[in-house]
Amino acid sequence: MNSSEHQSAGVQVDVPVRQADLGRDGSASTIGMARWLEDARIRLRLHRFERLIGKGRFGPFRILLVGQHISRLAPAGPVDTRVQVHTGVRRIGRSSVTFEQEITVGDERVGRGDATIVLADDSGSLQLPDELIADLDEMRLPETGAPGSSAATRLRPERLHRAHYSYWAPLRSRIGDVDSNQHVNFIALATWYDEAVAAYTSDSIGTTAGGSVPDLPPWSYRIQYLGEVTYPGDYEVALTVRSVDTGSVHYELGVFRGSTCLGVADAIGPHGELPSRRLQLVPAKL
């Protein structure tokens, strides 16, 4: 989405930077930006669809996020800075819609993302009603001549198996993570991936109890949600290093309950002081 597209399609909302959005460097974290993207999607007005629901002609249903991408492109902050989130529709399918989003502060582009959402009931996904499609069409972005990004990418089968991963971080779901759909919220799940990367980088550098914890959170996540993570429950977040270059580390992660994979993520974060020798010990198993 570029600056000209802001004028011709999509919806802009202003979001204030909150203390909880900030990372340890004093600017908004990738997870904080994910909250802004969610906030903007929730505030979209779908008048035809809302009237349809109000008349009792559609439902009951749930809104499920099946995949999303978030990238932190530049620092944003401090608290009370107002950022602009631009949201448009990139793709409308039979039962899903993919939103494309961009975060700006003035003329500076500080973040971007996309999200694919489906409507579902207990039997599975639902066909989007004509009224919702009409609302979404009004937010459709101009064609750019290049394939648009998508939160859902083809999943390699090995990503679903424990043997693919080299590092494990145990986590227990918390009641505060549970949303109105009665499962762990997708923002909470994103923090689990952050937690696993933090545990891995701390172990790799050799941080001791009470020592300084490395500040190397990913600046980009591409996440796919494959199953429900519920409360109560004990889970493990798996991690392996896909590749390493001069300035960054590419991680592959997965959330497991026993042998069942409930979600996967690809993340890119700073190399920082991570020792190359340690990174070479945990290559992805192809």
Image (cartoon, grey):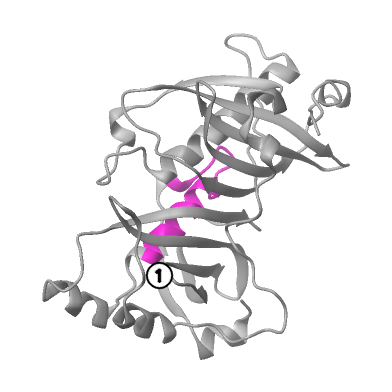
Q: What is the x, y in percent for residue 72?
A: 62, 54
Q: Is residue 81 visible?
A: no
Q: Can residue 150 be seen in this view?
A: yes
In magenta stretch: residue 84: no
- 144 displayed left or right of 276: left
Mark 1: which amino acid? Asp
- Work out whether residue 36 or residue 189 is closer to the camera in this orientation and state it: 189
Residue at label 1? 14
- 187 displayed left or right of 211: left
Q: Is residue 179 above or below residue 277?
A: below
In magenta stretch: residue 31: yes
- Of all residues, the one furthest to the top in this rendering is 209
Q: What is the x, y in percent for residue 86?
A: 49, 73
Q: In this view, does 233 lie above or below 41?
A: above
**Neighbour tally class for label 1: few under 14, some 14-19, many 20 plus, Cα within 10 Å:** some
- For the stretch drawn in magenta, the main secondary structure is helix
Per the image, label 1 sits on a secondary structure element best described as strand
Q: What is the x, y in percent for residue 117?
A: 43, 61
Q: Quadrant of residue 110?
A: bottom right
- Work out whether residue 22 or residue 178 is closer to the camera in this orientation and state it: 178
Q: Quadrant of the C terminus?
A: top right
- Work out whether residue 274 or residue 174 is closer to the camera in this orientation and state it: 174
Q: Residue, x 84% and y 20% (percent of image)? A: 281
Q: Is residue 57 above or below residue 173?
A: below
Q: In which quarter of the image is residue 206?
A: top right
Q: Residue, x 32% and y 39% (percent of image)? A: 183
Q: In which quarter of the image is the N terminus?
A: bottom right
Total labels: the figure holds 1
Q: Residue, x 57% and y 55% (percent of image)? A: 70
**The residue stretch that appears in magenta:** 21-41
- Of all residues, the one furthest to the bottom in this rendering is 8
Q: Residue, x 62% and y 70% (percent of image)? A: 108
